[in-house]
Image (spheres, grey):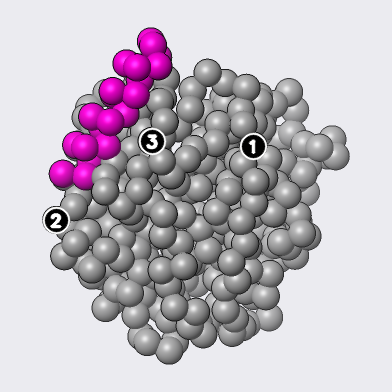
C-alpha cells in the first residue's frame, strides 16, 4: 500500500462512518479472448486524458437526478474480461513479437509524456489506458493502491446487474431509480442502499474475480474506502465498454447511458482527453470520485471512463492521492489523462 491507513469520513446510508482499508488480493480470471492487456510498473506506460470543470468542494455527496435508462438482463453474455498484468505482456493483433513491440513503444511514449507531471506530484498519481481501436495498453505507476471514493459505485452497479443475470431477474423500478442517482449524481445514500441490496463485499468480491480484478479490496464497513489500482479499473471498464465481458449487451448499454448523463458539475476528469471536452459532449462517458481525508485534510481524486480521441476509443483510469485540495487534484488527473492519451494517439 502506498497510502497510509487514515481515518476518513465515508459513505453509508445512515450517514458518515469511519473506517480503514484492509489489503486483499483476488485471483485473476483469464478471458477466452485473443487480446491480453499489458501494463507496466512505475517506469512507464500509456494513459488517460481529462479536461473540464471542478465541482463543489465537499465529500462525494450529490443531489437527485433522473435517467432515461432502464436495466435489462436478456441475451447471453460474452466471456470474462481479459485480465491484465502489472508487467508488460503483448496486446492484440499480428504476431506476439509485433504486439510486444507495440506495447513497449506505447509504454515508453506514455512514460515520457506523464513522468514529469507524476514526479512533480510526488508520484501520487497512477494512470492506465487501453486503446480499444488498436488493442494497445499502457500504464504508469500502476502498482500502487488507491482509495476508490465514488468510482466504486461503478463496481456496485456492475455486480448488481451481473447477479440479476445469474438469477434470471431484472432490476426493480426502485433499483433503477437508485442506480440513476448513484451514477449520474454520485448520491451516497443511493449507493449505500444498492450496496446493501447486492450483499456488500460478499457479493462484490466474487463478481470482481469474474470481472478479472486482482488488486481491488472491498471495505465492507465503508465501501468508499475500497482500495484498487488503475490497472484493475481498466479491467472493470472493459466489462462495461467491450463485448469481451460477462455482462450482456443490454446491461452494458444501460451502464453506459448512466455514465453519459453524469451531472454537469461532475463531468471533469478523463473527459479532458476527449476531442470535445464540453459538459454537453458525447465524446466521453465517466464516473468520478473525490474524498477528503479527515486526518490530513488531503484529497483522493479519481476518474475512470471511455473517451473518443482522434478517431480512437480509449479506456482511461487516473487515480490520485494526497492532493492539497479538490481543485488541485482535478487539475493533476486531467493533465495526466490528456498527456497519456495524447502519447498513445
- Is residue 330 among what the camera can see? no
Category of crowding for the residue at label 2, using alpha-carbon neighbours closer than 10 angstroms: few (below 14), some (14–19), many (at least 20)? few
Which residue is identified by label 3? 88
Which residue is drawn at the image coordinates 31% and 32% (left, top)? 308
Q: Are marks 2 and 3 in contact (CB under 8 Å)?
A: no
Instruction: Using the image, tell me which numbered label, if any, was put on residue 29.
Output: 1
Within the image, what quadrant is residue 285 found in? top left
As for residue 265 lying within the magenta part, the answer is: no
Category of crowding for the residue at label 3, using alpha-carbon neighbours closer than 10 angstroms: few (below 14), some (14–19), many (at least 20)? many
- Could you say where residue 297 lies in the image, as x and y percent from the top left? 36, 85
Which range is magenta? Answer: 93-112
Which residue is drawn at the image coordinates 44% and 78% (left, top)? 4
Front position in the image: 284 or 300: 300
Q: Earlier in the sequence, mark 2 or mark 3?
A: 3
Left or right position of 68 against 72: left
Query: Residue reaching furthest bottom?
Result: 295
Q: Rounded to the nearest whole Å, what is the CA distance between mark 1 and mark 2?
A: 34 Å
Which of label 2 and label 3 is nearer to you? 3
Front position in the image: 273 or 214: 214
* Image: 94 above or below 316: above
Instruction: Using the image, tell me which numbered label, if any, was put on residue 208.
Output: none
Q: Main secondary structure of the magenta part?
A: helix
Q: Rounded to the nearest whole Å, what is the CA distance between mark 3 and mark 1?
A: 17 Å
Left or right position of 143 against 202: left
Q: Dot 1 lies on which element? A: loop
Image quadrant where one finds the C terminus: top left
Which residue is identified by label 2? 116
Query: Residue reaching furthest top?
Result: 94
Which residue is drawn at the image coordinates 32% and 16% (left, top)? 98
- Could you say where residue 180 lies in the image, as x and y percent from the top left? 58, 53
Amino acid at each position: 500500500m502506498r497510502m497510509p491507513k487514515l481515518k476518513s469520513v465515508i459513505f453509508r446510508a445512515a450517514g458518515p462512518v469511519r473506517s480503514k482499508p484492509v489489503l486483499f488480493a483476488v485471483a485473476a480470471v483469464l478471458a477466452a479472448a485473443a487480446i491480453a492487456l499489458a501494463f507496466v510498473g512505475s517506469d512507464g506506460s500509456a494513459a488517460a486524458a481529462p479536461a473540464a470543470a471542478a465541482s463543489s468542494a465537499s465529500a462525494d455527496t450529490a443531489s437527485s437526478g433522473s435517467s432515461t435508462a432502464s436495466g435489462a438482463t436478456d441475451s447471453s453474455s460474452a466471456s470474462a474480461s481479459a485480465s491484465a498484468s502489472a508487467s508488460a505482456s503483448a496486446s492484440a493483433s499480428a504476431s506476439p513479437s509485433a504486439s510486444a513491440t507495440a506495447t513497449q513503444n506505447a509504454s515508453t511514449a506514455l512514460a515520457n509524456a506523464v513522468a514529469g507531471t507524476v514526479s512533480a506530484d510526488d508520484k501520487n498519481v497512477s494512470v492506465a489506458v487501453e486503446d480499444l481501436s488498436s488493442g494497445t495498453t499502457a500504464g504508469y505507476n500502476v502498482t500502487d493502491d488507491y482509495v476508490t471514493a465514488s468510482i466504486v459505485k461503478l463496481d456496485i452497479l456492475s455486480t448488481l446487474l451481473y447477479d440479476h443475470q445469474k438469477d434470471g431477474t431484472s432490476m426493480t423500478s426502485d433499483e433503477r431509480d437508485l442506480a440513476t442517482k448513484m451514477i449520474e449524481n454520485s448520491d451516497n445514500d443511493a449507493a449505500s442502499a444498492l450496496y446493501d441490496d447486492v450483499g456488500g463485499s460478499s457479493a462484490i468480491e466474487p463478481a470482481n474475480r469474474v470481472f478479472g480484478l486482482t488488486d481491488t479490496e472491498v471495505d465492507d464497513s465503508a465501501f468508499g474506502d475500497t482500495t484498487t489500482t488503475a490497472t484493475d479499473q481498466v479491467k472493470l471498464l472493459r466489462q462495461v465498454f467491450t463485448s469481451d465481458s460477462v455482462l450482456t449487451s443490454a446491461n452494458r448499454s444501460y451502464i453506459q447511458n448512466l455514465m453519459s448523463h453524469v451531472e454537469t458539475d461532475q463531468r471533469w476528469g478523463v473527459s479532458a482527453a476527449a476531442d470535445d471536452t464540453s459538459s454537453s459532449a458525447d465524446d466521453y462517458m465517466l464516473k468520478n470520485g473525490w474524498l477528503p481525508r479527515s486526518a490530513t485534510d488531503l484529497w483522493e481524486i479519481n476518474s475512470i471512463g471511455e473517451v473518443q480521441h482522434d478517431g480512437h476509443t480509449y479506456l482511461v483510469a487516473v487515480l490520485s492521492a494526497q492532493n492539497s485540495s479538490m481543485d488541485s487534484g482535478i487539475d493533476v488527473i486531467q493533465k495526466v489523462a490528456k498527456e497519456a492519451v495524447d502519447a498513445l494517439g
